[in-house]
Amino acid sequence: LNVPNNPAARNLIESGVFHDNPPITAFGKCTIQLTARAMANRGVKSKRLICSPTLRCIQTAEALANFLKAKIVIEPGLLEPLAWYRATSQTLPDFHLDLLSKLYPIDTNYTPQYKLDQLLENFDREQEKEGVARINNVLRSLAQESREEPLIFVAHAITLAEAASLATSNSYTDKMEGGEIIDRIGLGVRFPPGSLVAIQCKGEGQSSSYDLCPGVVPPLSYGEFYTNQPVFEATA
């Protein structure tokens, strides 16, 4: 029931070009459509959605874009740590962005913080900690840009964790100083599909700080977990 069954998704899957870059699930699409509607109803809007290059993230961003009337821009720097791909004997996927830009509302004029060529060059040597630091750096760099509207990122559970860490000072990079490895299953439990983390910047430059804003949209519940209520534990 959770396998995508619309014609466009089937064609992408059956073509074989995305065998290492899976699409959004049926449940995931329903979840993000509800989240997108809630964001639109609450007036959370932006002209662009900053998105990881994975297919499932682009499809998630498309659902948001339809409600928010926004364009998608691709930020390769938001990709999960490259060490996670190596751990499963995967190479860096060919994301086929030229093809996807014809199928989804992607603005190809955006200049990313990290280019895909940089990720490919660093694929064999980027460690988990460095991958998390890369994501954190993208969030911080874009957050400091002058703008008149919210920043909306569409990426992965680790992105949500690092976004929340800007307000809680509970970054995974700090925990990995002692050699800890991220529990990816636990990370997915704390930030289930459709999760939303909202933070607000106070001040400017080096003196700026962030606060969590848990009530931006009503939550979807997963038993004891909620999509807009990040669960922070001492052991990640």
Image (cartoon, rainbow, N blue to C red):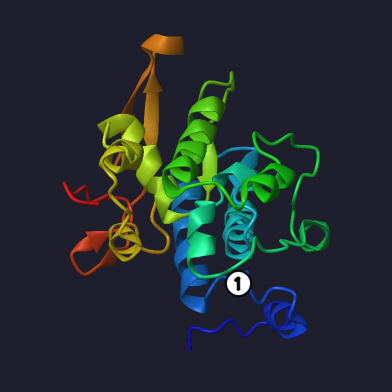
Q: Is residue 119 left or right of residue 85?
A: right
Q: Amino acid at mark 1?
A: Pro
Q: Residue at x 44, y 49 (%)?
A: 128
Residue at the bottom extreme of this rendering: 1
Residue at the front extreme of this rendering: 125
- Report which quarter residue 35 is drawn in: bottom left
Q: Residue at x 27, y 41 (%)?
A: 175
Residue at disc 1, secondary structure: loop
Q: Nearer the viewer, residue 138 or 88?
A: 88
The location of residue 26, given as percent across then percent down, is: 52, 77
The location of residue 171, given as percent across then percent down, is: 32, 38
24 in relation to 51, above or below: below
Q: Nearer the viewer, residue 218 or 18?
A: 18
Q: How many marks?
A: 1
Q: Residues within 10 Å of mark 1 (few under 14, many from 20)?
A: many
The location of residue 109, given as percent across then percent down, is: 80, 38
| Residue 197 seen in the figure | no
69 in relation to 93, above or below: above
Q: Nearer the viewer, residue 195 or 23?
A: 23
- Report which quarter residue 195 is drawn in: bottom left
Q: Is residue 188 left or right of residue 26?
A: left
The residue to which callout 1 is attached is 23
| Residue 109 seen in the figure | yes
Q: Nearer the viewer, residue 45 or 193?
A: 193
The location of residue 159, given as percent across then percent down, is: 44, 47
Q: Residue at x 35, y 31 (%)?
A: 166
202 in relation to 23, above or below: above
Q: Residue at x 46, y 36 (%)?
A: 136
Q: Is residue 174 left or right of residue 193?
A: left
